[in-house]
Amino acid sequence: MAGQMLLGLSILVGLHEFGHFAAAKYFKIRVDKFYIFFDFLFPMPGVMNFALLKKKIGETEYGLGWFPLGGYVAIHGMIDETTDADQLSAEPQPNEFRSKPAWQRLIVMLGGIIMNVITGIVIFSLLTFKYGEEYLPASEVKYGVQPNELGQKIGFRTGDKIVKINGRPFTEFDDVYKPDVLIGQNGYYTVERNGQLVDIRVPVDFMDQLSDKNQTPFVLPLNPFEVGQISSGSPAAKAGVQVGDQILKVGGQDTRFFPQLQAALKANAGKATPLLVKRGAETLTLTATIDEDGKLGFMPKSLLRSATRTYGLAESVPVGTKKAFGVITTQLTAFGKIFRGEASARKSLGGPMAIAQQYGGQWDWEHFWLLTGMLSMVLAFMNLLPIPALDGGHVIFLLYEMIAGRKPSDSFLENAQKVGMVLILGLMVFVIFNDAIKAIF
């Protein structure tokens, strides 16, 4: 998990800082340093100054810092986390940031955000081109759904067939999990139950409930399945289960559908349990000692038929762009719910530990690049927030300068930078401790 997170964030931070670097170089602004990670104890630029690797090329020192949290470019003549107003007391030189027109400084400050957006679009577009879009047609979910505890709480029942989302028919089952119904306003599902149509409303605090452990997905298709890949040494392997077997019963409970199997395994966790297995034309009884987590140790192969949409390279770009900006739309919706008090910041926000958990414990390059693309768009969104010390804070001050015709004083910018750093550090402490608390409890 840690390795994937560090690789993903290193790529994104490096590209973000390269956006600032490239724009500064284009406008002939001197860049003193370009670092992946910090070569000081962030946010104190004078403490524990050393780099793991560094090399000076021309006027710029390129390096790998020891403090694995972000990175930076030191742009000459700019007040940031590495420079204060006292260091800018001399007259501005032509190659300094502060001597350039406001519109050029604005482009330099937006360079990192633009690079993250481009990165997100490229990743989503290439993933779409390589893998296409695999989906489960809604028409295939003919046996209905199996809700978990949360799904039951909001009104779903086993066997419900979802026929409409927000009053509209749908063609892909994954639409059930889309943010516009889960965290939008007045979302609802229409299900067919015993020949009648029933509307199931999505609560306004549903995002909080989804954030709790083991609550997603809140409904799963009732899908007949067979045994796929079996882990070596697993309870399934020891019991003699084979690839292609259909597990009909666990401890006397019907398990025709995979959600039923999961429930039956949890109910018999840690116990030696009889399995009724169909193997070709035979029906066998095997005995498996289910592990303490309620697992047998195999990958299920759904017998519902999925479909795949394929795209040419040119076709993938608009699809990838829509997916990339969909991440930002979701972020805006989620922040709106937090600010309106409809969702808890504690349950909704995550830090490094939460990011690592999202990457998972196994290297899956498709999943790695998908999550990295999402994080790239999230970083673009977060950096655009109008908080001093973030790119968005600098952008606000530059827009003020362009509109008012005068720029804020260096001392004001320095103080604003300090306030912004306090806010960011407070948020960092909050998410790190929040991750730890959620992991423990």
Image (cartoon, grey):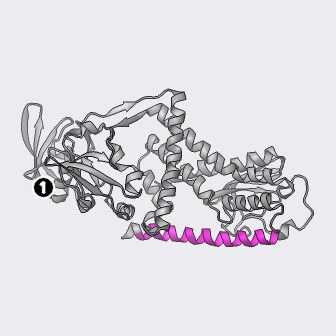
The residue that appears at 76% across and 61% down in the rendered structure is 400
Is 396 on the left-hand or right-hand side of 68? right
Mark 1 closeness class: few <14, some 14–19, many ≥20 residues within 10 Å: some
SS class, disc 1: strand
Amino acid at dot 1: Ala
Q: Quadrant of the C terminus?
A: bottom left
Can the viewer see residue 295 in this picture?
no
Q: Nearer the viewer, residue 358 or 93?
A: 93
**Residue placed most toward the observer, 282 or 441:** 441
Residue 136 picture location, percent across and down: 31, 38
Q: Residue furthest top?
A: 312
92 or 41, nearer to the observer: 92
Which residues lie in the magenta part?
409-437
**Which residue is at a point 84% across and 53% down the rendered structure image?**
101
Instruction: Tell me: 42 left or right of 292.
Output: right
Vertical comparison of 144 with 70: above or below: above
Tell me the residue that label 1 is attached to.
272
Residue that appears at 61% across and 42% down: 118
Q: Is residue 87 magenta?
A: no
Horizontal side of residue 107 vs 295, given as left or right: right
Residue 174 is at least partly visible in this image: yes
Q: Which residue, as the protein is rendered here, is positioned at the far right? A: 91
On the image, the x and y values in percent for residue 149 come to 24, 61
Is residue 323 depicted above or below 438 in this figure? above
Is 65 left or right of 168, judged from the image as shown? right
For the image shown, how many numbered marks are present on the structure? 1
Residue at coordinates 52% horizontally, 57% vertically from top-left? 332
Residue 310 picture location, percent across and down: 43, 29
**In the rendering, at what x and y percent does residue 23 appear?**
75, 46
Main SS of the magenta part reads: helix
